[in-house]
Amino acid sequence: MTFTLSPGALAPGARIGILGGGQLGRMLALAAAGLGLRTHVFAPEADSPAFDVCAERTNAAYEDEDALAAFGASVDVVTYEFENVPARTAALLSDLCLVRPSPAALAACQDRLVEKEFLAGLGIPVAAYMRVDDAGAMARAVAQLGRPSILKTRRFGYDGKGQALVREGGDLAVIFRSLGGAPAILESVVPFSTEISVVAARGAPGAFVAYDVCENWHENHILKFTRAPARVAPETAAEAIELARAIADALDYVGVLTVEMFVVDPPRGSAGPQTLRVNEIAPRVHNSGHWTLGGAQTSQFEQHVRAIVGWPLGGALRQGAEVEMENLIGEEVFGFEQYLREPGSSLQLYGKAEARPGRKMGHVTRVAPAKPA
Amino acid sequence: MTFTLSPGALAPGARIGILGGGQLGRMLALAAAGLGLRTHVFAPEADSPAFDVCAERTNAAYEDEDALAAFGASVDVVTYEFENVPARTAALLSDLCLVRPSPAALAACQDRLVEKEFLAGLGIPVAAYMRVDDAGAMARAVAQLGRPSILKTRRFGYDGKGQALVREGGDLAVIFRSLGGAPAILESVVPFSTEISVVAARGAPGAFVAYDVCENWHENHILKFTRAPARVAPETAAEAIELARAIADALDYVGVLTVEMFVVDPPRGSAGPQTLRVNEIAPRVHNSGHWTLGGAQTSQFEQHVRAIVGWPLGGALRQGAEVEMENLIGEEVFGFEQYLREPGSSLQLYGKAEARPGRKMGHVTRVAPAKPA
């Protein structure tokens, strides 16, 4: 006798390779372990938090082809905790094992221009944008889109890094140079009322499961709070999930993906509906999905693991009337004991040695009990 | 700035040593990782499931004093997943680091005779028992306690191993020899209606938190199902928790402990209360507490970790109207996909390579939604 498996599914004991050793890789590895799967973490930083919870570890650069070859040969499927995996790394691993989500899905989300063109091609609403390769293009883009607008590098941006606001009176050449002159796009500023995300999973046979749409608050460009469900109109939430589904289907996506969107309210006095603009796609588990760990039937981490090994997706129902996730950033972690004392809260710490400013050190999830009927 | 800590508490990043590398050690290591703690697993079996989820591993015998010395020096606190840690191992580690629960608590639970005398000394009801060191003592004990009764080795029994039923007509010398002539006790058979456990935690400053009393069903002497809450009278449940608290206090216990008890109904037609007999104490997390992982605010694994590092204990409230845990034993694990498909269920697999008969391979936890008010 052996395991009864759906077509294409890996068996318990299968080996999952994870590119990236931060808190997302760590929580993916913990979820995989809960399902009896073995993990091999590949990361360039010697003190990667995910190294402490995996069966095998490789500490090497993403460009180290010998290390990648050995890594790819040691696992059944490779996934990643971040979208900036070099294209050549993903391609090289694809020759050795499954890579999920696919390198093509990764490529669509690595570059803001490619991503915007992909979304626009699907008819999905995005902020107005223009390509900015040099100071001349910058001047033309600002003339077209107006101010305020935002210059964003096409690649490697996160937590507000690689972005610059173009205000009235700002010197365009200075702003362009402030991002190192990297290839960029200029975007109009969307006058949004709420920033939301859809965290959803698509399984190998095309099954799609979305969590409740959640809303996000940032402090200093870093996510501070997420709340599920988002306080938006029910039709807006349903539309957001349909947009995420359309994106996942178009990418033939396998795994968890996160779509960040802006909610734009109708003009004051107008009875029109809220509208949505997709801001960006993260082809991975995401900080705005951390509330699902303890706050939903299946965490985003377990859901991603189920998807990439071809197992049935889990339930995504929210626990309780509402769930709040609070990031503990930098020195905020020093007060961790107070969170341990909150009834109904759960604390995750990421095992990082040093509480540097702006560094995500852990998070708290608060589940509010269901309201009495 | 640094961490704000209660007196005696270890800081995040502290190193926990775990003696034993089975599924209990594995789930303890996963819980510790969720709290930002590092684990070092010490186990004699090279293919120990817990080795796949820890920061450091030592594969050595419990009698290997050099390995123990290195292990003890590498961690801040040592705990264990099983009670049969040799006394010398515990003593040696105590000289190097904190050992929690204490070697004295361990000693009280390793030997059925010592355990019964400890319980009787606290005035806690247990089955009638007599010490059996040889065939002569066996005959005297059976003459005293009658049949049916159960012969149990004083040490190393689990899942029905090290036990023999003394029926009418059974040859006493043969039964005594069937357990290898090991030092034993004879116990009367308790005519119980339900077998229950109390899983509870005592923190370093004496705080005590118990989960709901749960009831257990065995198949072939192996736990198959646990259900929380146990279907016993409320006074019976309250008394069970008070007995567990008295035991934990008397042992000056730190960590999670489990007390198995028999519930004896009053004679038919009598209006008297149910009574309890304590069967045994496990100085550790326990299979009958697995339902707390996903079925209570804080799992028994996280609760144990919080206790041994001196952190506040977590909430123990049950999620939902009732929670059921089903062990997947041997080849039962081959149908794991069906459990992944059950809405509201969560599956844990232990990462064991071979599904041998009687081997615990994983478990399923089913949380029934709270009933509408």
Image: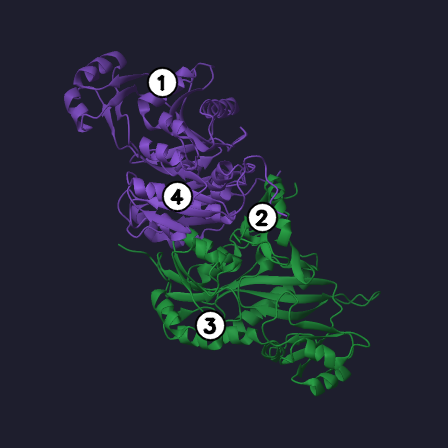
Chain colours: A green, B purple
Please state which amino acid type lies under the numbered disc 2.
Gln
Same chain, marks 1 and 4? yes
Residue B196: image location, x then y, percent: 42, 29
Q: How far apart are marks 1 and 2 (CA)?
A: 46 Å
CB under 8 Å between discs 1 and 2? no
Q: Say which of marks 2 and 4 sits in front.
A: 4
- Which of the marked residues, 1 or 4, is nearer the chain's N terminus? 4
Q: Is label 2 in a helix, a strand or a loop?
A: loop
Quarter location, residue B178? top left
Q: Is label 3 in a helix, a strand or a loop?
A: loop
Q: Is label 1 in a helix, a strand or a loop?
A: helix
Same chain, marks 1 and 2? no
Q: Residue furthest right?
A: A269
Same chain, marks 3 and 4? no
Q: Which residue is drawn at 37% across and 48% down?
A: B50
Residue A82: image location, x then y, percent: 53, 66
